Image (cartoon, rainbow, N blue to C red):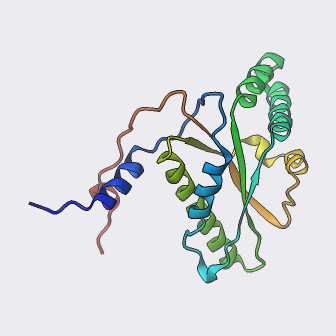
Amino acid sequence: MPVLNPTHDAVQRVIERRRTVHRFRPERPDEQLLLDALSTARWAPNHRLTEPWRFYLFSPATIDAVARLNAEIVAAKRGEEAGQAKYERWAAIPGWLAVTHERSEDPIRDQEDYAATACVIHNLSLLLWAQGIGMKWTTGTVTRDPRFFDLVQIDPERERLLGVLWYGYPEKVPQTRRRKAVSEILVRR
């Protein structure tokens, strides 16, 4: 009979049960939970220990401004009613965190820094999930609009935005979806 490693089993459970959350309860998680998770998430692998990631925690006023900008974008494409519905949904998301990495003149380092920052985001999602906090990593149209960068005071010439992380307590946890078998994704050479 195999010996179970409780640490391995706990990590495996968190990875396998984590889901992208689309709807959140209204209460915002205590900021210290986020700070503690960021403190651990930053231990992601990164070439040359560049630690290129930067995090921007949105205040309620910034959340509202970004939600209004997005509603304006949606309304221009699909009408005022659609824009208002989008505003109401976005304004209700309790926690917002933009994640960037410092740009590098070296294209290889820039790619490595992007990958390292993606690892930090994944670490963060797992650490929050283990605390009962869900997350959605979004890269919607608003995050490519120059007005977004002005609102959140990020210089896109100096930093590359990987996206905005919405976080909070899940209103509903999505069901588990099937993943491909390892035999479908592993190629032996």
List x then y, in percent, for residue 182: 30, 57
Question: Which residue is at 67% across, 73% downward?
Answer: 51
List x then y, in percent, for residue 116: 60, 68
Question: Which residue is at 80% across, 38% downward?
Answer: 63
**Total marks placed:** 0
**Is 138 placed above or below 53 here?**
above
**Is 114 placed above or below 153 here?**
below
- Quadrant assignment, res 64: top right
List x then y, in percent, for residue 61: 86, 37
**Is 134 placed above or below 172 here?**
below
Looking at the image, residue 138 sits to the left or right of residue 124; the answer is right
Residue at the extreme left of the image, as rendered: 1
Looking at the image, residue 156 sits to the left or right of residue 132; the answer is right
**Residue closer to the observer: 47 or 55:** 55
Q: Quadrant of the N terminus?
A: bottom left
Question: Which residue is at 54% across, 48% downward?
Answer: 128
Q: Quadrant of the C terminus?
A: bottom left
List x then y, in percent, for residue 108: 66, 78
